[in-house]
Amino acid sequence: MDDNSEKKSLRSLLLEKRDKTSFDLMNIASKKMQKRLKKIEAFRASHKIGAYYPIGSEILTQDIIQELLSSGKEVFLPKVLGKDIEFRKIKDFSSLEKGSFDILEPKEDCKKDNDLDVVLVPTVGITPKGVRLGYGHGYYDRFLANYQTVSISLTLEKQIVKNIPKQEHDIVIDWIVTEDRVFKSNIR
C-alpha cells in the first residue's frame, strides 16, 4: 500500500499517544463505547456484525463481541488472506487462533461471509469527516470498497485529528464512537 511520509509520521505519533493510555483508562473508555454503540440504529438493527479482536493498545472489543454473541447476533472476525481480509463467523472465543501479525483470527473451519450489516473498524486516528488512519496495510479500505456495509470506528477522543491526508483508495468511515460521544461523519 502506498503510504506517504506524512501519514507515517502521524501514525507513529498517534500510536505513541494511544500506547500511553493506561489499561484501566482503556477499559473504562471501551465500556463507554460499548454503551454508545447502541445509540446507532444501524448497529442495533444489525444481525451480522464484523468486529475485530484487539491488539496492542486498541479499544478492548472482547466485551462487545461477547455481548453480541450472547444476544444472538452473528459475529464475524477478519482473517488475513494475502493482501485482503475476509470475515468468518465465530461462535465464541474458542473459534479463534493466532494468525497473521499474531492477531487472533477465526479458525479455518469458520464459515466465510463478507455480506455484513455493520463492521467495527480498528482505528489509529480519524478526522470528524471520517477519514481514517489505520496501520497502513489497506485491508479495511479494500474490504469496504468491495462491500456495502455500515462502518463504525471505535477510537479514543484524543485520536481524533483535524486532518489526515486522504488518498484515492481511502474509504470514509460512516460513524465514529469515542468514550465521550457518538456521531455520524460529516463528509457527505
Image (cartoon, rainbow, N blue to C red):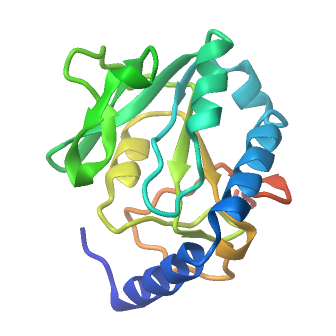
- Percent x, y of residue 183: 80, 53
Q: Residue at x 60, y 25 (%)?
A: 66
Outermost residue, left side: 82
- Percent x, y of residue 143: 37, 43
76 left or right, relative to 152: left
Q: Is residue 15 above or below residue 89?
A: below
Tell me, yes or no, if residue 187 can be seen here.
no
81 left or right, relative to 145: left
Q: Quadrant of the C terminus?
A: bottom right
- Percent x, y of residue 98: 25, 40
Q: Residue at x 79, y 57 (%)?
A: 179
Q: Is residue 109 above or below residue 187?
A: above
The image quarter in which residue 1 lies: bottom left
* Of 18 and 82, the residue lying toward us: 18
The image quarter in which residue 109 lies: top left
Tell me, yes or no, if residue 132 can be seen here.
yes
Q: Is residue 166 above or below residue 75?
A: below
Q: Is residue 10 above or below residue 188?
A: below
66 left or right, relative to 145: right
* Of 138 and 120, the residue lying toward us: 120
Q: How many marks?
A: 0
123 left or right, relative to 112: right
Q: Residue at x 25, y 51 (%)?
A: 102
Q: Residue at x 43, y 44 (%)?
A: 144
- Percent x, y of residue 72: 63, 9
